[in-house]
């Protein structure tokens, strides 16, 4: 008997064992093989899936939609303002109604408590497509990408640079602790991850052989790393903080000099996307006008370099989300 994840929610990697996480990554690799070979895998035929989005999304929305269709399920997008949720109807009542009609619910939004409420009251599996605290489906795609590129996860030296207390910083730290990585949060002290979460990650690390380091020293943080990972300096919902964040993080931009500081030539560059690496976006141009920056968290040179695997990560969102839905629904 293998793993039975049927009926489980996917809210944070805290709830999953290393074996379960590894199982989901391997399932995703298998789904990728099936997709590439054109072999049908409609194991969720007849299921209906609600995709609830309070915040915008390209990758997560498309990954859930295509994954549902490939698996034979019907996805229904419920965007901000489309339903009564939050304005005229409570989380609890919405959860109960959706659970009476749908077989599974994806939620992307602000408060982590909202996705917990949906899980508590809906009676069907609920998947976290990003909250202010965690972004666990992204970590599966990132770890799948590392496994594809390097062949293993345990012992991988990994530096997360930037806003280390955001949903990505938190989730990568938990995932790394679970999977035995040598993880470094590299950030100014004001943006260090929450102490309670660091203590939790360190306690998991004791069991898995992972190493968790929190530092504001870039040279120390990126020394010998196999992966440099960054994310936007200002997450969705925090737009009022651009100036303060730029001042805190401008020394933490991932650029050629930082890549060289690793001492390795083949260090992978990773980013969950979207990324501010050029002036091809409205926000990028606005920031350029106000603060004179050509790029924020990563230069265009690094983003487009041969070490960059950002679009592999983006594609792998779909394969990993398929694995999560299939494992929890069938
Ligand atoms: N990485 C990610 O979650 O992208 P979206 O915001 O486009 O879904
Ligand atoms: N930290 C980012 C992640 C986007 C995928 C945000 O929450 O906006």
Image: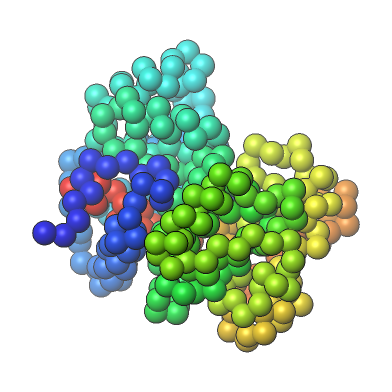
Q: Quadrant of residue 107?
A: top left
Asked if one can make out residue 103 in the rendered structure from this viewpoint, the answer is yes
From the viewer's perspective, tell me whether residue 276 is left or right of residue 294. Answer: left
Residue 125 against residue 291 in the figure, above or below = above
* Residue located at (83% from left, 45% from top): 243
Which of these two is toward me, 231 or 14?
A: 14
Could you say where residue 226 lies in the image, as x and y percent from the top left?
56, 77
Asked if one can make out residue 59 in the rendered structure from this viewpoint, the answer is no
Which of these two is toward me, 203 or 264?
A: 203
Which of these two is toward me, 149 or 76?
A: 149
From the viewer's perspective, tell me whether residue 242 is left or right of residue 268. Answer: right
Could you say where residue 277 lies in the image, as x and y percent from the top left?
71, 63
The quarter of the image holding the N terminus is bottom left
By what rule are the colours in the image chosen?
rainbow
* Residue located at (45% from left, 79% from top): 150
Could you say where residue 244 lies in the image, as x and y percent from the top left?
81, 45
From the viewer's perspective, tell me whether residue 84 is left or right of residue 103. Answer: right
* Residue located at (49% from left, 20% from top): 86
């Amino acid at each position: 008997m293998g793993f039975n994840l049927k009926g489980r929610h996917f809210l944070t990697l805290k709830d999953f064992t290393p074996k379960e996480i590894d199982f989901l990554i391997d399932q995703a690799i298998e789904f990728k093989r099936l997709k590439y070979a054109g072999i049908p895998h409609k194991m969720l035929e007849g299921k209906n899936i609600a995709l609830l989005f309070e915040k915008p999304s390209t990758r997560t929305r498309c990954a859930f939609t295509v994954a549902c269709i490939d698996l034979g399920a019907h996805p229904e997008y419920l965007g901000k303002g489309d339903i009564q949720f939050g304005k005229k109807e409570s989380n609890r009542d919405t959860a109960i109604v959706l659970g009476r009609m749908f077989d599974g619910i994806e939620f992307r939004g602000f408060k982590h408590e909202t996705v917990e409420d949906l899980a508590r009251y809906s009676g069907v599996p609920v998947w976290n497509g990003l909250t202010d605290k965690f972004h666990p489906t992204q970590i599966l795609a990132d770890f799948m990408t590392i496994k594809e590129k390097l062949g293993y996860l345990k012992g991988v030296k990994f530096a997360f640079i930037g806003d280390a207390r955001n949903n990505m910083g938190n989730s990568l730290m938990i995932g790394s602790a679970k999977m035995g990585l040598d993880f470094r949060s590299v950030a100014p002290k004001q943006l260090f991850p929450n102490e309670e979460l660091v203590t939790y990650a360190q306690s998991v690390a004791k069991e898995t052989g992972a190493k968790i380091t929190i530092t504001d020293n870039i040279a120390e943080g990126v020394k010998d790393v196999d992966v440099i990972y960054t994310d936007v300096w200002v997450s969705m919902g925090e737009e009022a903080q651009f100036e303060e964040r730029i001042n805190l993080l401008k020394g933490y931009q991932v650029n050629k000099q930082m890549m060289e500081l690793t001492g390795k030539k083949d260090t992978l560059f990773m980013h969950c996307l979207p990324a501010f690496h050029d002036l091809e976006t409205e926000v990028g141009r606005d920031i350029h006008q106000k603060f004179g920056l050509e790029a924020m968290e990563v230069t265009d040179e690094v983003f487009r370099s041969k070490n960059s695997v950002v679009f592999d990560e983006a594609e792998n969102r779909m394969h990993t989300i398929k694995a999560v839905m299939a494992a929890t629904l069938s």
